[in-house]
Image (cartoon, helix red, strand yellow):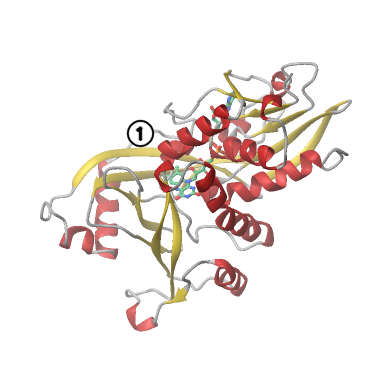
């Protein structure tokens, strides 16, 4: 009796399902279908490879600003539902620098809701930086958080089924199914019935090192580069070093020159990584991985499509490099659209 089917089990599909429960939908009426579930790894599954924290990576249009703010201010609720910070969602201080000052809209928005927000004095900026802020961020242990979110939803009665869809309408799994949420990320590029040619990957390579001495995030946003250091909570001291934003690059390969460049940029930005390293100047590299951010020309697609009598597809994809930090706001919008004509809600 699945009235609601969520296609995709990345962070966007899981946030959407969590939000359906928030709106009072009976979990037993929800099925999540996907090729990959938490615990799986594939270049076609972006969510396990995210850094991941709440940062200032996003654009400054009003919708994106809202998605960020909604997610930031509601993560506490998800953390509590999942049993507290040990679910893989904790808070650390972030320092962010820009080579070009962000827009007034962006700064005003961030200043209005970020906890412990302060503007850094220009005297402390690294060379070439025009603006800097510090605030209390949200940090995700992405693979572990995904797993815990799925377990929480399952324990509440949501069904999960492994399926490869070749056409989005295959997600109408019973005559009772009335709404499909399309949360297939990069899959929307080739999925029948969607075939969105605006969807493209933004490849990123990251280096995971062991760094018990680092308990904060630092990042620098340039015109054509992004350098970031992200503390991974409840991970036995992992630190994520990045990165790259390579548009329309589909490769899952990792490259030694990129690893060296990432280590060089991150240790220059935050020398403490080496200076206070318990093993001296040799960093312990645990893993090097590449992931594909599901980007979209024109930004995220959150749209309700009529596909039959009382049958709808609500698209919710294109989260690019900000699925964790903006995705709960996207889920709010998608669920709002889905339930808009439903008199029960
Ligand atoms: C290196 C890197 C660093 C990042 N850092 C951050 C960060 O710090 N903060 C942040 O907020 N975000 C970050 N991101 C971005 C974040 O990872 C993505 O925005 C997010 O994972 C997208 O989630 P999604 O659910 O849309 O897609 P995905 O995680 O790719 O999930 C797609 C789902 O759809 C399923 N699917 C697709 N096609 C089909 C099909 N045909 N049939 C069945 N199932 C299908 C897949 O199996 C999967 O379950 C980062 C990403 C990368 C790569």
Name the residue furthest left.
280
Quick check: 53 above or below 250?
A: below
Which residue occupies 55% across, 28% down?
155
Residue 305: x %, y % from top left: 80, 35
Compare residues 224 and 137 and report the one nearer the observer. Answer: 137
Which residue occupies 39% across, 74% down?
129
Which residue occupies 73% across, 22% down?
169
Residue 148: x %, y % from top left: 47, 35
Compare residues 270 and 81 and report the one nearer the observer. Answer: 81
Report whether 227 appears left or right of 277.
Answer: right
Q: Quadrant of residue 266?
A: bottom left
Report whether 38 appears left or right of 171.
Answer: left
Taking the image as drawn, is residue 129 in sight? yes
| Numbered disc total | 1
Quick check: 97 above or below 210?
A: below
Q: Badge 1, how many Cα within 10 Å: few under 14, some, many 20+?
A: few
Q: Which residue is mark 1?
A: 253
Q: In terms of secondary structure, where does tag 1 sit?
A: loop
Taking the image as drawn, is residue 46 in sight? no
Quick check: 105 above or below 342?
A: below
Compare residues 264 and 142 and report the one nearer the observer. Answer: 142
Q: Quadrant of the N terminus?
A: top right
Within 8 Å: ligand 1 and the Cβ of disc 1?
Answer: no
Report whether 138 appears left or right of 63.
Answer: left
Which residue occupies 37% across, 58% down?
227
Residue 157: x %, y % from top left: 62, 26
Q: Quadrant of the C terminus?
A: top right
Quick check: 214 above or below 308?
A: below
Residue 331: x %, y % from top left: 65, 44
């Amino acid at each position: 009796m699945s009235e609601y089917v969520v296609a995709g089990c990345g962070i966007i599909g899981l946030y959407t399902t969590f939000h359906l429960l928030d709106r009072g939908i009976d979990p037993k009426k929800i099925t999540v279908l996907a090729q990959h579930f938490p615990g799986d790894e594939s270049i076609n599954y972006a969510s396990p490879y995210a850094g991941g924290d709440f940062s200032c990576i996003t654009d400054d249009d009003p919708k994106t600003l809202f998605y960020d703010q909604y997610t930031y201010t509601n993560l506490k609720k998800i953390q509590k539902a999942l049993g507290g910070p040990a679910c893989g969602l904790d808070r650390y201080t972030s320092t962010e620098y820009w080579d070009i000052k962000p827009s007034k809209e962006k700064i005003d928005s961030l200043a209005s809701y970020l906890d412990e927000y302060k503007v850094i004095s220009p005297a402390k900026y690294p060379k070439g930086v025009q603006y800097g802020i510090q605030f209390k961020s949200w940090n995700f242990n992405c693979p572990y958080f995904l797993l815990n979110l799925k377990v929480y939803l399952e324990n509440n009665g949501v069904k999960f089924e492994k399926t490869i869809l070749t056409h989005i309408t295959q997600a109408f799994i019973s005559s009772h199914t009335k709404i499909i949420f399309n949360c297939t990320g990069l899959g929307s590029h080739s999925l029948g019935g969607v075939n969105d040619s605006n969807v493209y990957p933004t490849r990123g390579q990251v280096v995971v090192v062991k760094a018990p001495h680092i308990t904060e995030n630092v990042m620098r946003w340039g015109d054509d580069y992004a350098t970031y250091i992200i503390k991974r909570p409840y991970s036995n001291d992992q630190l994520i070093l990045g990165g790259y934003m390579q548009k329309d690059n589909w490769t899952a390969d990792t490259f030694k020159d990129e690893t060296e460049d990432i280590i060089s940029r991150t240790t220059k930005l935050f020398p403490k990584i080496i200076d206070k390293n318990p093993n001296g100047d040799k960093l312990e590299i645990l893993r090097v991985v590449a992931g594909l951010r599901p980007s979209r020309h024109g930004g995220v697609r959150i749209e309700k499509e009529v596909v039959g009598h009382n049958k709808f597809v609500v698209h919710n994809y294109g989260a690019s490099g900000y699925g964790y930090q903006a995705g709960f706001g996207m889920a709010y919008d998608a669920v709002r659209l889905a339930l808009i004509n439903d008199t029960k809600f």
